[in-house]
Image: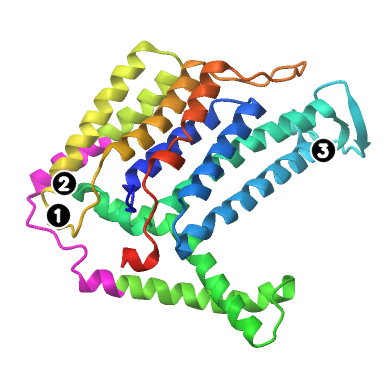
Amino acid sequence: MSARWLHPAAWWIWALGLAAAATRTANPLLLGLIAAVATLVVMARRPEAQWARAFSVFVRLAVLVIVIRVAFGILFGTRVGTTVLFELPSVSLPDWMAGVTLGGPVTAEMLVIAALQGAQLAVLLICVGAANSLASPVRLLKALPAGLYHVGVAAVVALSLAPRIMVNVRRVMAARRLRGRPTKGLKAAAEAAVPVLESSLDDAISLAAAMDTRGYGRMTAVTPKQRAAQAVLVLTGLVGIGLGLFAALGASGWGWALLVAGILMSVGGILISGRWVPRTRYRPDRWGWPETVTAGSGILAAVTVLAAGPDSITLPLTWPTLPLAATSAILLAATPAAVTPPPPVPWEAA
């Protein structure tokens, strides 16, 4: 299979599908399996680019989230369970803070619940980090519809923040190493903060200048009625999507109808607004069967876990099991590591 870039939307659909599955299960085996699948695909299909090295940052952030969640559980968590491991000095709180504890007995059940709740958010961050490492932010912006171009710029800039910071950090640390200065410890981090901030500001100024040179923000003539119609469609559609998701997650039959209606109205507003934003695409990414397999595997994992219902934490705690359907769907989400084309090397991408 010849090397080429996979469509960035396929990577994001795949990652968001795994993230949706992670938010609907508290089974530590399934959460670990989702994290392992995301890591495997990243290791197999991560391109040789500076922005693609941000995955390790998200993994460290995920571990930090679990540690913080467990620490908060020890200090302020609800005292549940009977297996007391140790006891902290407790502080009496006023009546208006009923339900909140500070200190007291720390049980094994409480630590397990805190770790599982932190693991859900940690796996979500790993999935987002996988998408950041596999999909180029620039190609993602190029693939967006014209109606979402302005929103897409803000989203892509926000999503590319971590990769750009890591590029600047590595460049500054390499310069410090060449000058014989320390590159580890709090002192080194404090001394490198100003050069990293300066480099980030230079990148932002360069991006703004490039966007202005290319005529970003120019629009064709739009009448007030057209602008009002587009705004009403998009805003009403977004409200419908929000209400539909809330009702659908609550197992309400009319919620799905409202969700579909909101999506259709939002798409209609986006298509109308796209007619006012003249755009051209140079060498657009094509959508082939590898993209379909990648996006479909992520959607299948999300649908399978969602169909099984929310897997909540109950007491007494029992050893988790691996449900066959959810496990098979999550394992199938690892197929992009084998069926997708490898990314081009830098001199081929040029």
Residue 339: name its quadrant.
Answer: top left
- Amino acid type indicated by mark 1: Val
Q: Residue at x 64, y 52 (%)?
A: 60
**Colour convention of the picture:** rainbow
What's the residue type where badge 3 is placed? Leu
Q: Is residue 218 magenta?
A: yes
Q: Give the residue pinned by disc 1.
A: 277
Q: Which of the numbered marks, if any, corresponds to residue 73?
A: none
Q: Residues within 10 Å of mark 3 (few under 14, many from 20)?
A: some
Is 252 or 89 nearer to us in this picture?
Answer: 252
In the image, residue 297 above or below residue 253? below
| For residue 297, above or below residue 216 | above
* Residue 11, placed above or below residue 266: below
Identify the element where label 2 is drawn: helix
Residue marked by disc 3: 102
In the figure, residue 215 lies in which quadrant?
A: bottom left
According to the image, label 2 marks what residue? Answer: 273
Tell me the mark number nearer the camera, choosing from 3 and 1.
Answer: 1
Work out whether residue 273 or residue 344 is closer to the camera in this orientation and state it.
344
Q: Residue at x 15, y 48 (%)?
A: 274
Q: CA distance from mark 3 to mark 1?
A: 55 Å
Q: Residue furthest bottom?
A: 179
- Give the residue drawn at x 88%, y 34%: 104
Q: Residues within 10 Å of mark 1 (few under 14, many from 20)?
A: many
Quarter placement of the C terminus: bottom left
What's the magenta region?
209-235
Nearest the viewer among 334 and 264 is: 334
The reply, left or right, for residue 111 in relation to residue 343 is: right
Query: Where residue 116 sits: x, y (%)?
Result: 68, 32
Q: Determine whether label 2 and label 1 are within 8 Å by CB.
A: yes
User: Relative to 295, does residue 175 appear above or below in the rendering?
Assistant: below
